[in-house]
Structure formats: C-alpha cells, structure tokens
Amino acid sequence: MTAAAAALREEGVDVIALSQGEPDFDTPAAVCDAGIAAIRGGRTRYTPVAGIKRLREVISEKLQRDNGLSYDIDQITVGCGAKQVVFNALFASLDPGDEVIIPTPCWVSYPDMVRLAGGDPVLVGCDERHGFKLKPEDLEAAISPRTKWLMLNSPNNPTGAVYSKTELSALAAVLRRHDQVHVLADDIYEKLVYGMDFTTMADAAPDLIDRTLTINGVSKSSAMTGWRLGYGAGPKELIKAMNTIQGQTSSHTSSISQYAAMEAIGGNQNYIAGFVSDFRKRRDFVVEKINEARGLQCRMPDGAFYVFVNCAGILGKITAQGRVIETDMDFALYLLEQFGVAVVPGSGFMASPYIRISYASSMDDLQQACGRILAACDALCENEKT
Ligand code: PMP
C-alpha cells in the first residue's frame, strides 16, 4: 500500500500514507554523530559476525538494566534488523514439518519466514474481545509434538496489544507442560507503551530462559529503521547456529550502524519520552476520530504506533461508483483511490475485516486523513440509503 500510495503521489494525486511501519522522527543527533565518527575514524571494516564485542556488552547491560535479564556476550547476536534475527532463528532451528505457533493478527513477515525456513505456520486467532491477545487455552490446543516455537510479539504489530506480566505468566504455565516448545519474544516495540509496564517473557518466566529467544533492536525505539540493526539474546547453542547462518549470508550489519547503536542503546535515551508523548497524543486523536466514523470501531491500543480498526460495519456497502465493498482489501483500495488515504488491509496480518492505521505521521496529516476517512464512510452509508 505504501508503494501504491507513492506511485499515485508521483502521478500528482494527493495521498496521505498511514501505511508505514516506521517512526516519522529523525534519528537522534547523538546517534548520527556516533555513526559519522565511526566513518571518519575509519571504523568501516568487517566486524565479528555476532557483532562488535563492545556493542554486545552494551546490549547485555541494556537487557540487565531494562529487563532484569543476565546474558553473556556469547549469548547475544546482532543482525541486519530484528527481521534478520527472527529469520536466522527460524532458519537455524526448523526442520521440515516443524510447527511454529503464530498468534494472529500478526506481523506480515512471520508466516512466510516460517515457510521459507521449511516449517509450518500454525495460526491461532486472537479475539478482539480479548484484546487481540493469545489465551492460554488456545495455546494449549495449538501445541503438537511438532511445535518448535511460539512467536510472541508485544507490543503487537498490527494491534498495539501489550501483554501484562500476569498474562505472560499464564502462557508460561502452558509452556512448562511442553518441553519441545521455545518462545521467540519479539520486543521491537518495547519502548512504545502508553501507561502500561512492559514485560518480556524471559522476565515473566525466568525458568524458561533456556528456551526463550529475546529479540529487540533500534528501529522503532531510536527511529533507526534504515540503519538496519537488531539483536537477539538466547541459549548459547542457538545463538551459535544463528551466527553460522549469518556468517554465510550477510556476515554482519554495517560497522557504522553498530557504532551508532552503541550510542542508541548505551547512551542518553531521553528522546524516547518525547516520542512516546507525541505518539500518545496522536493515538488518542485517531482512536477518537475513528470511533466517530460510521461503520468503523476500534479499541484503544496500549503500545506500538498502530490502530487496528474493525470495518465489519462497512462490508456490503456500495461506493458512488457502484462497487460493493466485500473485503477489507476493497475498503483499503476505496480509501486510497477515492479519498487519497493509504492504510493496510487486515488480511495482510491474517485478520479480517480490519484495516491498520499507522499514526507515525504528523498531527496535520492525521487530522486531514481522519477527515477523509469519516467522509468516505459517510459516503458509503449515504449510498446505501438511496
Ligand atoms: N518485528 C515486528 C513486529 C515489526 O513490526 C518489525 C518492523 N516492521 C520488525 C520486527 C523488524 O524490525 P527491524 O527494522 O529491526 O528489522
């Protein structure tokens, strides 16, 4: 949708993109300076595959400080974004036919990554009425002797759902009964929570640490999506296997990004409070507006920068051009083509009928875009009457 929005823009159409998965803030100046200093200082050569030792020390300190987790540096690997770290983990561990439980709605990449690595994704729907969160009984029912991983993403893309410590403990109680299941905790949105405490699985269930891989990065917390740096912390053997794979593919992420990340993770992070406060205002605005739209309804998400909107009330309605909106994809295309707003259909996240609105945009854009969405819904409802 972002690409479609960009193409329309190039044709001169006025499009507001609310489809992006990245903060609209600039990378903090001190982080940029650290990258520039690395370039000027000639620190531009190959690094160890697992990442520069000092960076892994800084990550180890961060995991201790923020999450109460103790990891040696040989239990930490750095890759080209959290994305590559997830991929390395799946590639290193899955045999053909192994199953990976993915609670849905989920990040679009998980199921395909599992398939690429030869595994079978097992999608488990999480009810909107339960805050889009996985229930222990549904986890229990999805586990089989072939289950290798449970993918947990909190705060969640696309729903913004955040698991509390109690909720994680309830899931851990199920996992204790099944030794074969490992947990991949994708914490990439850790810092973007609004009024809730963040807890990661290895902290909620320290006894499961030997089968937990904690993944995080700098993309969302330090507005560094283009720098491509993420990391994973977990059992030594798994990290070693992940490094073997990375050693034969990308080798490592850019040395420059690694020096910048030392500053992002180990330096002053006061800017995060500013990001959080801006995102929170935008979230509140979007949720209020969307709930005023006819046929749309959404929950107040606790984290990330997305609002996941139920558009069941729109299905079956007819556009001014005489087209019936049958799916969330039809609705997303209608918003893009007729009203110049790009959003992502829920089908991309294995959940329908929903649309995902990213509020990582200026307040001006959000105001305009919400006005257009309200008008788009009004137009559909008016057509129905005539
Ligand atoms: N996990 C989730 C849930 C995401 O939404 C994203 C980015 N969209 C990533 C991982 C990947 O982040 P990175 O930029 O660090 O590869």
Image: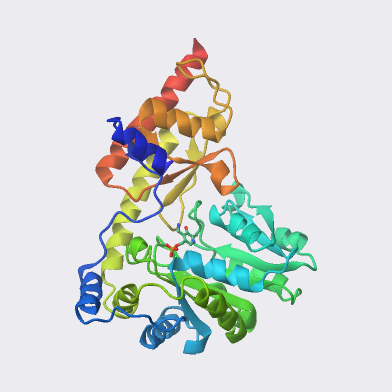
**Depth order, front residue of 14/168:** 14
Q: Residue at x 71, y 62 (%)?
A: 139
Q: Residue at x 56, y 79 (%)?
A: 244
Examine the image and state in which quarter residue 194 appears.
Answer: bottom left
- Give above or below for 74 relative to 38: below
Residue lying farthest to the right in this orientation: 145
Q: Residue at x 50, y 67 (%)?
A: 84
Expressed as whole percent of the image width and height from the top left, the position of residue 161 reads: 51, 56
- Give above or below for 341 relative to 358: above
**Depth order, front residue of 19/208:** 19
Q: Considering the image in quadrants, where does the N terminus appear?
A: top left
Examine the image and state in which quarter residue 143 appears.
Answer: bottom right
Q: Is residue 67 visible?
A: yes
Expressed as whole percent of the image width and height from the top left, the position of residue 353 reads: 57, 37
- Number of marks in the rendered image: 0
**Depth order, front residue of 270/90:** 90
Colouring style: rainbow
